[in-house]
Image: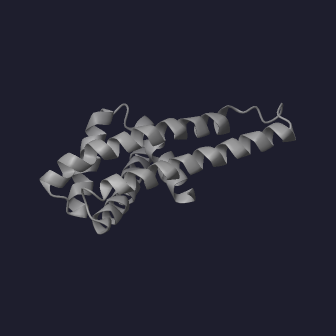
Amino acid sequence: MKRYFFTSILLFFFSFVYAQRFSPEEYRQHLESYISEQAGLTKDEASRFYPLYQEMKDKQRVLFREVRSITHRTNIANTNEATFRQLNERICELNLNIDKLEQDYLAKFRQIISDKKYFLVKRAEASFQNIELRKAHNREKK
């Protein structure tokens, strides 16, 4: 769960970094190309997998945005302990829902690609995000 949260934060960060450089559609195309190469997806697998994968990511993004809203918009100074308890419970619930979505979609993915390929998809996604983060960091240094 922590890894997914970190990955989501990176993905959200990249959306801001690349907003000025290229469109989200271009980012998605680069990501899908990288994942397909790294995971060894055939064209047929990719054409069936990515629409479902993007559907899952879109649903997860909605939940993540709510987590982000809670964590970034809560006025720390004016919030009491009982409210923090409720906020923490809500964040945990949202993170569980994010993970549950992936678990539900995994059954659908298994009809398209093997578990090994899905494992490689997840690894490639994390690798791509790390590469892009380093690129963004290097651009900031210049």
Position of residue 51 measured from the top left corner of the image (x, y, whole percent):
27, 42
Position of residue 53 measured from the top left corner of the image (x, y, whole percent):
33, 47
Q: Quadrant of residue 58?
A: top left
- Please give the name of the residue rendered at 44% of the width and 45% of the height, measured from the top-left corner: 11
Position of residue 68 measured from the top left corner of the image (x, y, whole percent):
59, 38
- Please give the name of the residue rendered at 25% of the width and 60% of the height, measured from the top-left corner: 113
Nearest the eye: 18 or 87: 87
Q: Quadrant of residue 16?
A: top left
Query: Relative to residue 50, is residue 80 depicted above or below?
Result: above
Nearest the eye: 61 or 138: 61
Is residue 41 left or right of 56 when viewed as pictured?
left
Q: Residue furthest bottom?
A: 116
Position of residue 46 measured from the top left corner of the image (x, y, whole percent):
20, 51
Quadrant of the drawing holding the N terminus = bottom right
- Please give the name of the residue rendered at 37% of the width and 51% of the height, measured from the top-left corner: 132
Q: Residue furthest left?
A: 43
